[in-house]
Amino acid sequence: MRGAAGRAWQTAGVCGAASPSTRCPDLRRLIGVAALCTVLAGLARWWVHHDLYAADPTLLAPALDDAYYRETAARIARGESFDSFLAPLHPFLATRLASGASLTVSFLGGLNAVLGALTSGVVALAAGWVAGRRAACTAGLLHALAGVFLFHDVLSGQEAAIGLAAAAAVLCGVVLTGHATAPPLGGRRRAAASVLLGAAVGTAALGRGTSLVLLACLLPALRRRTGRVRLVGCAAAGLAAVLAAGAAWNQSVSGTFSPFPWSGSVNLYLANGPDARATVSVTADDLGWDPWTIERNALAIPEREEGRPLTRREASRWWLARTLRDAGGSAAMAAHVLRKAALFWTSDERGSNHTAQAEREFATLLRLVPV
């Protein structure tokens, strides 16, 4: 955008010190595209949600992870204090938004449908900031209608919340970095975007600790030599604020000042132990199959081996040590990781409660779009 419109963007501080001839995105049009993608994504998710929760027997009588998330949300709503085995961020959010609604898996799936629809809008904004309206339309519509997101965004787990936080981190990263169509921000807006990036990464990390890798979204913005320390400091402040809130929760219920649930090392073993390497799946025969059994055994097994009661954090460290001990050597572990990477690109599903192929029997839209 040239001329008077470009100067108006500079006056507002959006385009920093760019010259009037520098093209800037039309923010209002980008927001319009993002809003359209959000609405379309919401309608698509409502369609899938309606079909599944009206007919899928595994949702009419929820079990395994579906039931575990519902039970966790209900315990939080009752005001119980407990050291959560799985990340409590999504159930906690659900209890705050329920406002008296029944905490069913349908409600949890509906909340995820909203989060997934918002993610489509954020994806559109990020793509549009980098490459304009056509890219915004393409990216937003792909996320809105891709079967893999439609499938996950109506289930009761935490994937939709983590996806929205991840998309927000990417958006903050591209806004900070700028582009030929959108030069970097300056001043206070740059600091604010950096704080938001850190907070988005922290939110995703509360659901899955490995999401801390999203801090890499800040790296392209550090190519500018000026303001690097301030940029990193603001991102660290946003990250610390969110993680401190999670740590305060754990401190209040378990006496451990850590932002993460105690299942991290157990999940590491489930994904990389001997049984997992043999089947290339997430499994361990001695831990069991459903979340409640895994949680009980994750504490009982190390206590039996050590011959004394353990805290849950001590049990988590025990499972980390066992994962390293039973790794089978660096060559075996490398081969296992490469097999998992190869399976990522295949059509073979490794589902738990749900698989996209099964859900196509109940959700009309999933039969029409690629999953």
Image: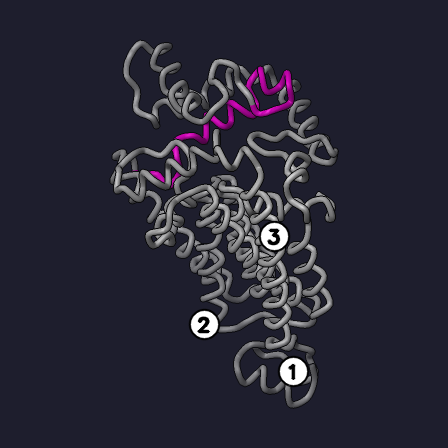
Q: Is residue 93 left or right of residue 45?
A: left
Q: Residue furthest bottom?
A: 4
Sort mark 2 into few (<14), some (14-19) or many (20+) by Cα contacts within 10 Å: few
Q: Which residue is mark 2?
A: 188
| Residue 342, percent from left and from top | 72, 31
**Cβ atoms at labels 1 and 3 below 8 Å apart:** no
When asked about the image quadrant of residue 80, the answer is top left
**For marks 3 and 2 on the same chain, the one whose residue lies earlier in the sequence:** 3
Can the viewer see residue 241 in this picture?
no
Q: Which residue is mark 3?
A: 47
In the image, residue 304 sits, relative to residue 202, either above or below, namely above
Which range is magenta? 257-282
Q: Amino acid at mark 3?
A: Trp
Residues at circles 1 and 2 in contact by the CB criterion of under 8 Å: no
Q: Residue at x 61, y 65 (%)?
A: 125
Check disc 1 and report the residue beneath it.
19
> Which kind of residue does numbered mark 2 sit on?
Arg
Between marks 1 and 3 in the image, the one whose residue lies nearer the viewer? 3
- Dot 2: element: helix
